[in-house]
Image (spheres, rainbow, N blue to C red):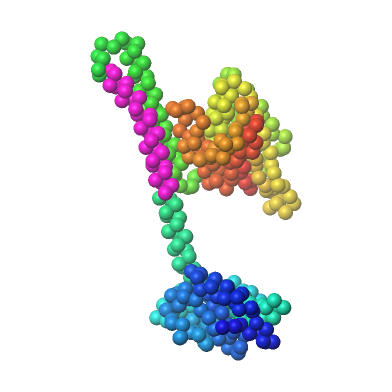
Amino acid sequence: MKLEGPSDNTIEETEQQMLFDAIASSNLAHTLSSLEDGNPLIYVNQAFLDETGYSSEEVIGKNCRFLQGPQTDPNAVEQIRKALREFKPIDIELLNYRKDGSTFLNRLKLSTVFSGDGKPLAYLGIQSNIETLVESVRVRQEQYKMEALGRLSANVSHEIKNALLPVRLMLDSLSELPNMPIEQSERCVQIACKNMDIAEQIVSDALTYSQSGNRKKEKIVACNFHNDLISFIKGLLPKRVRLKVNAPEPLEQYHVQVDVTGMYQVAANLVGNAVDAMGGDGTIEIETFIHEISRSQIVDGKKKGTLKICFSDTGPGVSLEVAKSVFEPFFSTKTPGSGTGLGLAISHKILGQHGGDLSLKRLSPATFEVTLPTY
């Protein structure tokens, strides 16, 4: 079959065969319609037949209007006709009918096939059942959720087993050696209790990581939020860690909407990691500023933009290899028992639930940037 335009110009047969091979193998419904009066179908692929329930013999030579029915939007039909008359592409949704009378919401993409010299040859239609696509996306999302849940469960199980193993060993020692010196028995109890605390923290962090985004947020003046956050951070620092705060811009004109407890958790994770990286001795610098302010972002007299808070420390920095995995759940460079590897993953998720972000901006000095929208 050759596609003939108004001047009998044709596509080279090899190119035409490649075109038909491509649309024949597609899992989306494809059609080719002639430029002749009535725009009859000259080709449909198997996906079109499967979706509509018709046979090839029933549709070739007919206009695609046989897919329309009582509830098909006439405005959508008129838009399609106009696009065909003007040889313009169109992407539109409309209700179509199958042979058995059932309906499907069709996303139709129509465009004109042109020859090498720019002459129109035919109309190419690509149809996709929106309901099928939505269901396919939903199924994939459920699969991803189950896979993520499986990975999370496996990691939690592994970490809890590691935490409980010393508990069993200590209890076995106490039962097998009833006359153990008091100092040694107290040491066994301390180790067991510490590891029970680790196991409890793993479960708590896992629950926090998997919780939904329904956080109770309150609108706060940005400067008040910043000052409260700094006061909270000061209470976390050991004696040999110094804090340097740099907030050159006035923040009184901006507001943030935050779950304060969640933001404290983010700060605790970032500061805790910095303290550990510096070995408990060094300086943490926190720089706060507003980004992307313009006249167009002034609404009702209030400025809008992005609040950015950067956390830097004087530790050894982050290697490129570590940077690739730093926000992955259960990834940690700390020694076993020193952390669950969920802190940054949880913090990243909390910021996402606020419409913000947490990112690693510099490797050395290690700099993490918190961003929050202002209102």
Instruction: Please tell me which residue is depicted at 59% across the width and 83% down the height of the picture.
Output: 2
Residue 113, visible in the rendered structure: yes
Horizontal arrangement in the rendering, residue 42 relative to residue 367 (left or right): left
From the top left corner, tell me how far across and down residue 331 is, in percent: 49, 36
Please name whichever residue, 367 or 250, is drawn nearer the observer in this view of the structure.
Answer: 367
Residue 126 drawn at (x, y percent): 55, 73
Residue sitting nearer the eye, 306 or 32: 32
287 in relation to 32, above or below: above
In the rendered image, the vertical position of residue 117 relative to residue 338, given as above or below = below
Q: What residue do we see at 62% from left, 42% from top?
A: 371
Q: Position of residue 329 (x, y in %)?
A: 48, 40
Position of the N terminus, as image quadrant, is bottom right
- Please identify the dominant SS of the magenta region: helix
Residue 206 within the magenta-colored segment of the rendering: no
Determine which quarter of the picture holds residue 257: top right
Asked if residue 70 lies left or right of residue 305, the reply is: left
Looking at the image, which residue sits at the far bottom? 37
Magenta-span inclusion, residue 148: yes
Q: Which portion, as a residue range, is magenta?
A: 147-174
Q: Residue at x 69, y 38 (%)?
A: 289
In which quadrant of the rendered view does residue 17 lie? Answer: bottom right
Percent position of residue 359, x then y? 60, 41
